[in-house]
Image (spheres, rainbow, N blue to C red):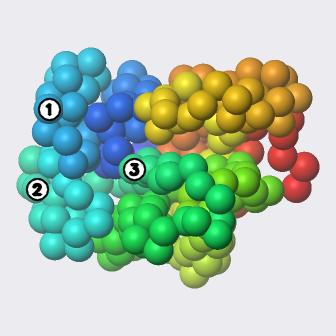
């Protein structure tokens, strides 16, 4: 662990949270700032970013960044470093659900779009972060996956495949970086009341809840608490792991 960090304190660290204008990203960014972390809010929506920054507070800095654009990601990394300092935390929360469609009717362009945001976007942001974190000898990367990537949901093939791939990427990165001081873990939530699920039909929402033994959606704040620990120095011997927060849904 870097010498300037205490085993618990996160005060003064710099974090990047993608997809931070709303949903899980916004909740995680807010929770990090409560612990004294300076947070770069990355999102492609400048209007949403302005609103998010007002909610998160003065310890945050909004950066317009499209995770599907490698040059934009690298530019956002540079801007963040120049404005806030070297990031030691990266939370990859940017994601889309994609269409709800039978597999036989799932359009290839939708498939490519979902994977480009959810999987390739995570890859791009990690590639921007890893060299500097390894050079510093310390870093925490938290990838937001989904329980759907472990046991599958029907009619959202692109989303399920992308989140399963994020879990695999996390395992590979965790093992590769295990001795560098950079730890990489994933969170696999069940469905939460966020905008990503806002267009689901009542029947589909009912099916999602029926899969959860606790019989409710997970709150963004609950996911943020788990992300906080994984992003902290207190997380010191977990890497390449996927942590379920699914109300009892996941069994492996």
Q: Is residue 29 above or below residue 176?
A: above
Q: Give the distance between the C-alpha atoms of the residues marked 2 and 3, in whole angstroms.
A: 18 Å
Category of crowding for the residue at label 2, using alpha-carbon neighbours closer than 10 angstroms: few (below 14), some (14–19), many (at least 20) = some
Asked which secondary structure carries label 3, the reply is loop
Q: Is residue 92 left or right of residue 81?
A: right
Q: Is residue 119 left or right of residue 206?
A: left
Query: Residue 47's mark?
Result: 1
On the image, the x and y values in percent for residue 231 come to 50, 46
- Tag 1 and tag 3, C-beta contact below 8 Å: no
Mark toward the start of the polypeptide (1 vs 2): 1
Q: Is residue 215 left or right of residue 11?
A: right
In the picture of the structure, the residue carrying the numbered disc 3 is 94
Q: Residue at x 29, y 34 (%)?
A: 21
Asked which secondary structure carries label 2, the reply is helix
Asked which secondary structure carries label 1, the reply is helix
Q: Residue at x 44, y 31 (%)?
A: 195
Q: Splitting the image into 4 quarters, where does residue 114 fall?
A: bottom left
Q: Is residue 112 above or below residue 251?
A: below
Q: Is residue 194 above or below residue 179?
A: above
In the picture of the structure, the residue carrying the numbered disc 2 is 79
* Quadrant in which the C terminus appears: bottom right
On the image, the x and y values in percent for residue 37 come to 33, 34
Category of crowding for the residue at label 1, using alpha-carbon neighbours closer than 10 angstroms: few (below 14), some (14–19), many (at least 20) = few
Mark toward the start of the polypeptide (1 vs 3): 1
Residue at the far bottom in the pictured view: 176
Q: Is residue 225 visible?
A: no
- Of residues 116 and 81, the one nearer the viewer is 116
């Amino acid at each position: 662990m870097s010498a300037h960090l205490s085993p618990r304190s996160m005060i003064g660290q710099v974090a990047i949270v993608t997809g931070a204008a709303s949903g899980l990203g916004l909740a995680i960014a807010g929770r990090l700032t409560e612990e004294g972390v300076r947070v770069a809010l990355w999102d492609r929506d400048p209007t949403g970013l302005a609103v998010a920054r007002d909610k998160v507070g003065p310890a945050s800095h909004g950066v317009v960044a499209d995770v599907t654009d490698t040059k934009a990601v690298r530019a956002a990394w540079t801007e963040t470093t120049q404005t806030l300092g070297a990031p030691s935390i990266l939370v990859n929360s940017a994601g889309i659900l994609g269409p709800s469609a039978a597999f036989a009717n799932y359009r290839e362009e939708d498939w490519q779009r979902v994977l480009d945001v959810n999987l390739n976007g995570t890859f791009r942001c990690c590639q921007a972060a890893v060299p500097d974190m390894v050079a510093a000898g310390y870093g925490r990367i938290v990838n937001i996956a989904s329980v759907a990537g472990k046991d599958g949901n029907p009619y959202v093939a692109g989303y399920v495949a992308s989140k399963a791939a994020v879990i695999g990427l996390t395992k590979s990165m965790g093992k590769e970086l295990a001795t560098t001081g950079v730890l990489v873990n994933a969170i696999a939530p069940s469905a939460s009341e966020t905008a990503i699920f806002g267009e689901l039909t009542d029947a589909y929402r009912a099916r999602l809840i029926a899969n959860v033994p606790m019989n409710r959606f997970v709150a963004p704040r609950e996911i943020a608490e788990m992300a906080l620990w994984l992003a902290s120095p207190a997380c010191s011997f977990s890497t390449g792991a996927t942590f379920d927060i699914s109300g009892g849904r996941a069994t492996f």
